Image (spheres, grey):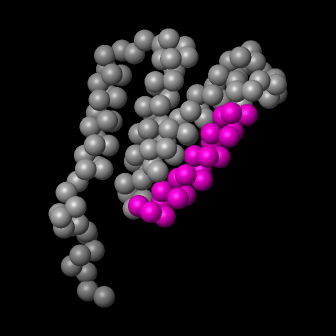
Amino acid sequence: LAIAGGSCLGMSMILADVALVSSGGDLIMQFKTFYIYIALLCGNCAFIITQFALMKEDGSIVIPIIHSLVILVSVIMEYVIYSSILADIQLAGIGVIIFGVFLLTHKNKDEKDHSIFENEVV
């Protein structure tokens, strides 16, 4: 669910930018394009999906996945829509993000969670 939420949020951000660009930078005129309405729909779907993801999974896993996917989906859609060319350092950053999400989501389930509150006496 976190993957879907992050993807919807990333699409929402890029579509809102497309709406602003297609309206010539006019904030009011962007509401005459259909991009802004698709962006609002994606943003609302992202909110709902994120709430369900947080009910089912720990927030320390869901939130980094969502934030990482917002970046990745935005970069991919910007490449597709605007034909942007990424620098090598940007590609390396994307690789680090993907590796970090992989490490976060594939930790060993048998490992003991070493919490800082583990030895605290109540």
Residue pushed farthest bottom?
122
Residue at image point 23% right, 76% down: 118
Residue 30 in view, yes or no: no
Residue at image point 48% right, 60% down: 54
Estimate the x, y position of residue 75 in percent, counting from the top left.
46, 25
Report the magenta stretch's main SS.
helix
Answer above or below: position of 34 versus 46.
above
Estimate the x, y position of residue 112 in percent, counting from the top left.
19, 67
Residue 47 in view, yes or no: yes
Estimate the x, y position of residue 53 in percent, counting from the top left.
48, 56
Asked if residue 48 is among those painted magenta in the image, a careful observer would answer: yes
Answer above or below: position of 45 versus 115.
above
Q: Quadrant of the C terminus?
A: bottom left
- Looking at the rendered structure, the number of numbered marks drawn on it comes to 0
Residue at image point 46% right, 24% down: 76
Asked if residue 74 is among those painted magenta in the image, a careful observer would answer: no
State the residue in front, 55 or 25: 55
Estimate the x, y position of residue 57 in percent, counting from the top left.
41, 61
Image check: 109 left or right of 24? Answer: left
Residue at image point 39% right, 62% down: 58
Magenta region, residue range: 37-57
Residue 17 in which image quadrant: top right
State the residue in front, 17 or 102: 102
